Image: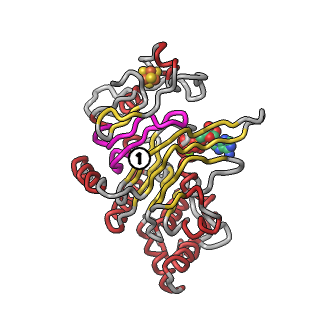
Amino acid sequence: MGFVANTLRLNAEAQTAPLLSVDDLTVSFPTKGGGHNAVVTGLSYQIAQSETLGVVGESGCGKTMTSLSLMGLVPGRGRVTGRIGFEGRDLLQQSEKQWRDLRGREVAMIFQEPMTAMNPVMSVGQQIAEVLKVHEGLGQRDSLDRAIDLLKAVGIPSPAQRARDFPHQLSGGMRQRAMIAMALACRPKLLVADEPTTALDVTIQAQILDLIIELQEETGMAVQFITHNLAVVSELAHKILVMYAGRGVEYATSEQLFDQPLHPYTQGLIQTLPDPDRKVDRLHVIHGSLRVQPAQGCRFASRCPLASDECRAAEPILREVAPGHFVACVKVN
Ligand SMILES: Nc1ncnc2c1ncn2[C@@H]1O[C@H](COP(=O)(O)OP(=O)(O)OP(=O)(O)O)[C@@H](O)[C@H]1O
Ligand code: SF4
Ligand SMILES: [Mg+2]
């Protein structure tokens, strides 16, 4: 879908309250010294019905922790604060029982690692069928038929036979596709997709992205799509949130972000995209590492070509610099 169509749809959706509204989300883990280490800090964004938000940023910047917060699945002693509004409810105030009703049916997630989401001792077809039985009230025959249809839709050959396999009998790529089928089975209101296609070959990737878009058009599903690959989100996302070291550093419509990236980190990411018109296909690299972070000031300063003393004085937070375009950089007016 083109940018213009995306934007028109975005504007139409903006009239209504967003389906998901994340405010000041922080995820932290206890440290050995008795303190807390925040891996996501003060994140705020919204997703409307029928809208796709792309979340991009390099490894370790907090994309998965943000997604797991939406599912009530932050591991271990992780502490989540802020507010996650979903259809008027605050997801951070849900009981475990309320979460069980919500997960899979209203909010579903495609995990980065498929085995975490699958039952190792139940056939793949039966697992999908169980979801359909519980949430859609289908009988055994109908739910299994639907499960086979879904396996076919995610590009699994001989789906009726594969449905009888257990997860460990499938290759990694097949398991990933089976998990996507399971997440889509209940037509959730919000789909959280964490790097769903990275491990798959290009044809299957395209097929799965098409399937997500098709289902979104049919059901009005909202999607949070996580990836480190900006090229993938450009195809799919209406809005994009760029994360760096646990913070949102730029948040805008896809059109704004690609036409006028404002944060130096985003500008660097866009330059890493292969340009079909460039004769010498040499990729621009953002030097440095996420691990080198200052005690105060802008977290990107050690890698930023524009950094100066001003940047190290206080941490910039997201502010709206044009309608709907937010950036966290002291040099942007
Ligand atoms: N169980 C945990 N306890 C403490 N820290 C954790 C735990 N799980 C993850 N982290 C830390 O949280 C930070 C964010 O991790 P997260 O998995 O959200 O990153 P990501 O952006 O999804 O990275 P990737 O692109 O590699 O998947 C990382 O620094 C990671 O080391
Ligand atoms: S605040 Fe300074 S260091 Fe940070 S991104 Fe902007 S220019 Fe670079
Ligand atoms: Mg991750």
Task: Tell me which corner region of the image, top left, top right, bottom left or bottom right, holds residue 92.
Answer: bottom right
**SS for callout 1:** strand
Q: Residue at x 43, y 30 (%)?
A: 328
Task: Tell me which corner region of the image, top left, top right, bottom left or bottom right, holds residue 91.
Answer: bottom right
Quadrant location of the C terminus?
top left
Considering only vertical position in the picture, is 54 above or below 163? above
The residue range painted magenta reads 233-257
* Residue 133 located within the stretch drawn in magenta: no
Q: Residue at x 59, y 24 (%)?
A: 292
Circle 1 residue: 54
Where residue 114 appears, as percent x and y from the top left, is 58, 58
* Residue 247 located within the stretch drawn in magenta: yes
Q: Residue at x 26, y 56 (%)?
A: 12
Where residue 241 appears, as percent x and y from the top left, is 42, 42
Position of 172 compared to 330: left or right?
right
Where residue 71 appears, as percent x and y from the top left, is 56, 57
Q: Residues within 10 Å of mark 1 (few under 14, many from 20)?
A: many
Position of 124 compared to 321: left or right?
right
Ligand 3 image-quadrant field = top right
Is disc 1's CB within 8 Å of ligand 1? Answer: no
Most foreground residue, 313 or 99: 313
Of all residues, the one furthest to the right in this rendering is 33
Figure label count:
1
Kind of residue at badge 1: Gly
Where residue 137 appears, as percent x and y from the top left, is 51, 82
Most foreground residue, 314 or 264: 314
Considering only vertical position in the picture, is 217 above or below 11? below
